[in-house]
Amino acid sequence: MGLNVPESLAREVALANRILYDQQIVDGLGHVSLRHPEDPALFLLSCSRAPGLVRPEDIVCYRQDGSSLDPQAPRPYLERFIHAEIYRARPDVQAVVHSHSPSVIPFACVQKPLRPIFHMAGFLGEGSAHFEIREAGGDTDMLIGSAYLGEALARSLGTRSCVLMRG
């Protein structure tokens, strides 16, 4: 485990990755993070590893600029800026999940918000937001690989609990 990562939290974040992978919420490229409970300017995220393989020792503590507190930390996810900028913009957010769910991806291509139609979808509340990466970054590799794109994504999320990312 890296600097400032309590052992119990490292186990929880590792377990969250494995559960979400097992339940097919995230694929081999998805990830989940947790805001640090003792310092809200920090968050915990695995190093670049498939979520089904994440171990407690893979959990790294990051600042909201996406940099690791540990200069010896293993290679980070390129898209850690998704997490960093959402935590920066939304002090109320305690966890972030980035998923490539095949059942949801098609909805990212239409500009209609997902809306809850049964109680298990109540977290959608006012519906989903949409993020079109071309509006923020032009022709890109479609990855949120910079603070600039992460900030644009966080702005699109606004006050909602879910943002669909086209691409």
Image: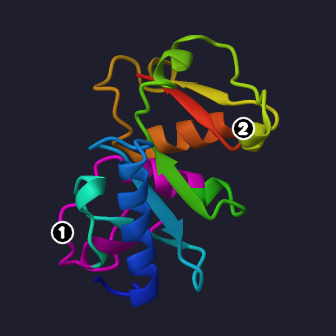
Q: Position of residue 5 (x, y in %)?
A: 40, 84
Residue at x-position 30% and y-position 77%: 56
Residue 6 appears in the rendering: no
Residue at x-position 42% and y-position 25%: 102
Residue type highlighted by circle 1: Pro
Dot 1 alpha-carbon crowd within 10 angstroms: few under 14, some 14 to 19, many 20 or more: some
Quadrant where the image shows the N terminus: bottom left
For residue 116, which quarter of the picture?
top right
Q: Is residue 62 magenta?
A: yes
Q: What are the residue bounds of the magenta stretch?
A: 57-86
In the picture, the disc for residue 121 is: 2
Residue 166 appears in the rendering: yes
Q: Is residue 83 above or below residue 165?
A: below
Residue at x-position 53% and y-position 20%: 108
Q: Is residue 126 magenta?
A: no
Q: Nearer the viewer, residue 70 or 45?
A: 45
Residue at x-position 64% and y-position 54%: 89
Q: Is residue 106 above or below residue 152?
A: above
Quadrant where the image shows the C terminus: top left
Task: Provide the residue designation for mark 1.
Answer: 74
Q: Nearer the viewer, mark 1 or mark 2?
A: 2
